[in-house]
């Protein structure tokens, strides 16, 4: 007989914290950019996830359905980097308001700081109220999702290490 333990008696190794941050970032970007795509198609906003492609990609394909899907993928990948920024800066904060504030900061960065570099995006003063409110809420919810998830995982990791 084998001296190997039964499979049900083996314990599974927990996922590394960096891997969890990658997954949180990717799925946070995927979920909330799909919600943004929904909002774009139902005219809650005048811009969709393809907005991220405007400074770099050439051609009219960016405003088609294909461009929106590519925008969702691009946001999902960029969101991994954004999740690591949150991890490095705010992982120890246990409040949900830190994530909401992070989402607000991201919204200000996109719509005020990076606005001149995004050709398809009007200035905030020229956007309609629906676009402003919808995009702000999406950014706040994205920040809440990423921030609270990362802070929760950080607390769980520290709790397991002390036990």
Image (cartoon, helix red, strand yellow):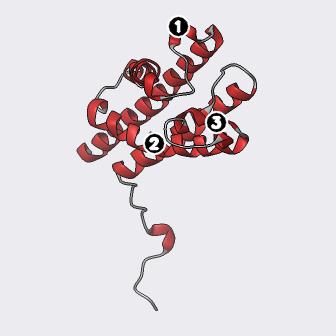
- Looking at the rendered structure, the secondary structure element under dot 1 is helix
Label 1 or label 3, whichever lies nearer to me, is: 1
Give the vertical position of 101 relative to 54 (above or below).
Answer: above
Question: Between marks 3 and 2, how big is the CA–CA gap?
Answer: 14 Å
Please give the residue where the numbered disc 1 appears in the rendered image. 125
Dot 3 or dot 2, earlier in sequence: 3
Question: Between marks 2 and 1, how big is the CA–CA gap?
Answer: 27 Å
Please give the residue where the numbered disc 3 appears in the rendered image. 34
Neighbours of disc 3 within 10 Å: few (<14), some (14-19), many (20+): many
User: Where is residue 37 shown, x and y percent of the image?
Assistant: 67, 32
Is there CB contact under 8 Å for labels 1 and 3?
no
Dot 1 or dot 3, earlier in sequence: 3
Dot label at residue 68: none
Dot 2 or dot 1, earlier in sequence: 2
User: Where is residue 73 shown, x and y percent of the image?
Assistant: 57, 46
User: Where is residue 3 shown, x and y percent of the image?
Assistant: 40, 86
Residue 33 lies in quadrant = top right
Neighbours of disc 1 within 10 Å: few (<14), some (14-19), many (20+): few
Give the vertical position of 159 relative to 133 (above or below).
Answer: below
Is there CB contact under 8 Å for labels 3 and 2?
no
Identify the image quadrant of the C terminus.
top left
């Amino acid at each position: 007989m084998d001296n190997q333990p039964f499979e049900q008696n083996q314990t599974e190794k927990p996922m590394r914290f960096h891997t969890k941050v990658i997954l949180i970032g990717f799925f946070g970007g995927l979920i909330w950019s799909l919600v943004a795509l929904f909002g774009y198609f139902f005219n809650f906003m005048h811009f969709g996830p393809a907005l991220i492609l405007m400074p770099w990609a050439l051609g009219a394909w960016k405003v088609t359905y294909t461009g929106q899907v590519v925008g969702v993928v691009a946001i999902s990948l960029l969101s991994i980097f954004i999740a690591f920024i949150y991890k490095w800066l705010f992982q120890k904060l246990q409040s949900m308001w830190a994530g909401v504030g992070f989402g607000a900061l991201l919204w200000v960065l996109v719509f005020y700081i990076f606005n001149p570099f995004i050709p398809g995006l009007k200035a905030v003063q020229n956007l309609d109220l629906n676009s402003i409110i919808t995009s702000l809420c999406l950014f706040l919810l994205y920040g809440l999702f990423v921030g609270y998830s990362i802070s929760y995982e950080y607390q769980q990791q520290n709790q397991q290490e002390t036990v």
